Image (cartoon, helix red, strand yellow):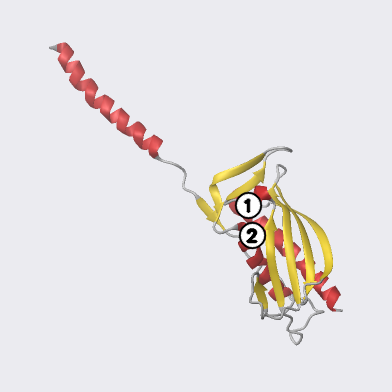
Amino acid sequence: MKSNCSVRIAIPILLTTTLVLCGCLGRSPQTKFYLLYPSPTLEATEVVTTEENLIIGVGPVELSEYLDRPQIVTQTSESELQVDQFNQWAEPLEVNIARVLARNLSTLLSTENLFLFPWSGSTQIDYQARLYIIDFKGTPDNKVALRAHYTIFDGSKKPLEMNVVNIIRSISEPGYEGLVLSMSKALDELSRKIAETTIALRN
């Protein structure tokens, strides 16, 4: 009789423990999605005025293969990268970069005539900025590293200027929000370099 009683008590305890464990094991971290964004503090460059009304094309933007993925990539050591399944880009990274650059250049060059690649063949472009993003990641020393090659073309698709830019930004806020904030600020600097090159060509 005592044995039957022990069995009856043990079965509910076992079932409860199993359900609790299943519940815990069934939960996975919630994936978060991020966007790079244009700077609200950029100011127009004095050299270019609104009367010039330049028509600028941005793109295509190409990525190194390790960046061409939805997950945010960070560098954890000299030879190791971390690809985070639960912190991802909300849209393809090259699309996000192109849109941010276009918005920044619109401000810097005082023009609303910005087009993202591909644009209509009938669109008359004054200058086109084509980019290859070599590196764009968080680093082990709590910084963002952006290395980009850009080429400026004229309206006839003739290359006018080619440059490689290396930008390092400290990450001042914790977590992936801080990382994305610093990456957006790195794009601000890249935008300014492209704007300065365009202005120099214009003059």
What separation in Å lies between label 1 and label 2 (alpha carbons)? Answer: 8 Å
Vertical side of 139 occupied by 195: above or below: below
**Would residue 185 be found to the left or right of residue 17 on screen?**
right
**Would residue 76 be found to the left or right of residue 150 on screen?**
left
* Observer-nearest of 148 and 178: 148
Q: Are marks 1 and 2 in contact (CB under 8 Å)?
A: yes
Element marked by disc 1? loop
Residue extending furthest toward the bottom:
51
**Would residue 87 be found to the left or right of residue 20 on screen?**
right
* Observer-nearest of 135 and 131: 131
Residue sitting at 70 percent across and 73 percent down? 57
Q: Residues within 10 Å of mark 2 (few under 14, many from 20)?
A: some
Residue 41 visible? The answer is no
- Which quarter of the rendering shows the C terminus? bottom right
Residue flagged by tag 2: what amino acid is it?
A: Glu
Residue sitting at 68 percent across and 52 percent down? 172
| Res 139 quadrant in image | top right
The residue under label 2 is: 94
Residue 147 visible? The answer is yes
Whichever of callouts 1 and 2 sits on the residue coming sooner in the sequence is 1
The residue under label 1 is: 68
Vertical side of 101 occupied by 67: above or below: above
Q: Residues within 10 Å of mark 1 (few under 14, many from 20)?
A: some
User: What is the x, y in percent for residue 190?
Assistant: 75, 63
User: What is the x, y in percent for residue 178?
Assistant: 63, 53
Element marked by disc 2? helix
